[in-house]
Image (tube, helix red, strand yellow):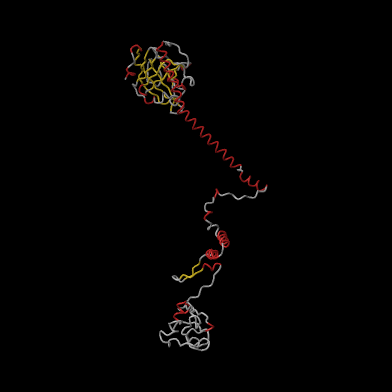
Amino acid sequence: MTALRPERESGAGYGQSFTDGSPYGAGGGQGTPYGQQPYGEPGAFGDGGWYDTTQQGAYSYGGAAGGGVGGGGAAGVDGGTAYLPPVDEETVALRIPDPPERTGYDAGTGYDEDTGSATYGSRGESSAASADSGGRAARRKAAKKRQGRRGGANRPAEDLDAPHGHDAPQEPRAPLSRVEARRRARERKPSAAVVASRGIGEVFITCGVLMLLFVTYQLWWTNVRAQAQAGREASDLQSDWASGKRSPGAFEPGKGFALLHIPRLDVVVPIAEGIDSKKVLDRGMVGHYAEGALKTAMPEAKEGNFGVAGHRNTHGEPFRYINRLEPGDPIVVETQDTYFVYKMASILPVTSPSNISVLEPVPKQSGFKEPGRYITLTTCTPEFTSTYRMIVWGKMDEERPRSKGKPDALVS
């Protein structure tokens, strides 16, 4: 036999009795040696023999109950003590000894058979294993150690639903000292430079907003309001003409007495007495030069220059596009009884505001050489400024009573 066998329990030779030197299976010196007893004889596999004894579950070595192995029921070794064959697993093959128990960081160290290198785990595994072997208190202690060592990475599942960040309840803080509270208050207080920069910025922002509102007022709201006022004045004037309340003659300053039509520009605007800004021009109307050295003739005069002024921008801007007029374009003045039709003759794009010679009966720079019936339109230039003046002249072409209907310039 090549397998290892445990040492014999006594000094008896192989096949000998354990006590008196009788052979193995001799029944304590009384039986026949094992293998020499005939088959079927009592004491072999028959009655009271070894076979019956094994069937009954009492494997006795020469015992009295059921006889011994090969014995005829005589008492065996140690007075019939039952014998169980020793476990011989250790003799089957060589074994690798169990590794020693490891603690601390060594508990996570192992050996990888595929790579032939050591593997390193975590102490949490060993502590978990030791906690599993212990009771509930050991497991709780191991869990607390893992949580403290890993910063709460292995928190229990019930802690995952707890609020975090700003929603988590804040831990109570110790009250600040008086000195520390004052220091923090000074840190939160802005410096003088910051306060000054904020104030300047607010001033600039306020000025910008006010300027934007002013531009909106000048370019949009003044036109809306002036056109509404001029429209009411024109409507009232036509109603008075229809009822006969007004008649040609002297008119009060600021009161409308005629309507100016410029068909090419689609302009219909009332003509009021005087050139006062608040009473006439800013209300969207055209003003007649009728005072002092600027006084001009009326349309029905047989000779003279009928001069009017109006805004080019803002406040209704009735003369905004008079620079687009061309020679021959009609300019019609409508009164209570008559239509006075003029033809555009010439234009002076830029002149000084003090050049009042353009309003003379025979205006200079107009191209007219002799007295006649003329009309002069004056406005500011360039647009959105009042630095200079633009002048447009026209000459009387037709005088048509209202009883004959509208002139062709207003019909077409």
Q: Quadrant of residue 334?
A: top left
Would residue 322 appear left or right of 277 to someone viewing this image? left
Question: Along the line of sight, which residue is nearer the eye, 147 or 268?
Answer: 147
Answer with the quarter of the image where residue 51 lies: bottom left
In the picture, the quarter occupied by the C terminus is: top left
Closest to the observer, 43 or 297: 43
**Residue 75, percent from left and from top:** 51, 84
150 horizontally vs 299: left or right = right
Against 328, residue 102 (above or below) is below
Q: What's the residue at 51%, 68% (across, down)? A: 109
Residue 124: % across, % down: 53, 63
Query: Where's residue 272, x and y in %?
Result: 44, 17
In the picture shown, does residue 115 fall above or below 410?
below
Which of these two is toward me, 44 or 210? 44
Residue at the right extreme, as displayed: 178
**Quadrant holding the N terminus:** bottom left
Q: Tell me residue 90's x, y (percent).
A: 48, 78
Tag count in the figure? Answer: 0
* Of residues 177 and 198, the one drawn nearer to the viewer in this rendering: 177
